[in-house]
Amino acid sequence: MSIPGLRSFPYGCLPLAAGGCSLVGLVVPYIIAVRLGHVYPILPFISDTGALHPENCVFGQMLNLTSFFLVFIVYIRHKQVTQEGPTELLEFNKASTLLGYTAALFISLVGNVQIDVNSQHAIETEVHLFSAFMAFGGGLLFSLTQSWITYKLADDFWSYSMAALRFTLTFAGVVFSVTLLEFRELANAEFNGTYAQTLHWNPHDGGYVNHVYSSVSEYMMGFVLTALILSLYKEFSAIKPPTGDKTNPVAKVAAKGDIEIARDSLVSVL
């Protein structure tokens, strides 16, 4: 598949890079935070594992890179659907693209504005939590719209299967988002310590079980959205520059051959 305006590049590496950075941002800060005793191992919120130094450096950098790669993924996916899709999908595709850019922006904010571990009402904490809500919400809406686009573009068993997979992952993400919020509210209502102590929320504290359920839901949401990004690998790997693209060496050779054939034809006529 060729897309005008795109240079020759292994575009399949973009979903892999974004997915890889997302996984590192979810897992490595947790490992560091647990080893340094900054959080109770079972099971802190994702934001808690990126709240203190040095794990917050890894957390912020990985989310920034995820956001960076996601911007390119959203742009190229927009071009891809515009090239392949029917006219009635164009406006829907624009809306999906806007949702993707929104998610990328707030993913970056989540990484750069970490919670203040001493205050639930600090501006940093409020910005971080709002950004996390927008990142997850925008990501799920982007996934939902992309699932529908995949279904509308499907033309064989495997492409219909991919649409079904994306719808399933999106539905799972919605379920996890609901359980995340519900169990978080229950846990906070039962917790009997200070906000600073939530990093070490343990079985002796009130609301611990609900806290774990909420944390598991949050991690599952992160893994679901990462899987949705990775699912774009096949479509992106199929992208090739158009044959008339001057940046494509193959196209250059073909164009040169066409010129020589035309010149020989002209000489024979003369």
Image (tube, helix red, strand yellow):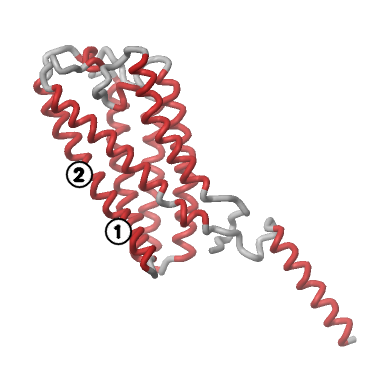
> Quadrant location of residue 257?
bottom right
Foreground label between 1 and 2: 1
Q: Residue at x 38, y 48 (%)?
A: 98
Q: Position of residue 210 (x, y in %)?
A: 14, 28
**Looking at the picture, does residue 232 appear above or below residue 105?**
below
Q: Are marks 1 and 2 in contact (CB under 8 Å)?
A: no
Q: Which residue is mark 1?
A: 164
Location of residue 190 in the rendering, given as x and y in whole percent from the top left corner: 9, 21
Rendering coords of residue 188 (x, y %): 14, 23
User: Around disc 2, counting alpha carbons within 10 Å, would you say few (fewer than 14), some (14 to 19), or many (20 or more)?
Assistant: few
Identify residue for label 2.
Answer: 175
Label 1 residue SS: helix
Vertical arrangement, residue 50 with respect to residue 16, above or below = above
Left or right: where does residue 232 sit relative to residue 263? left
Can residue 88 be seen by looking at this rendering?
no
Q: Is residue 5 above or below residue 102?
A: below
**Three-letter residue code for mark 2:** Val
The amino acid pointed to by label 1 is Ala
Observer able to see residue 68: yes
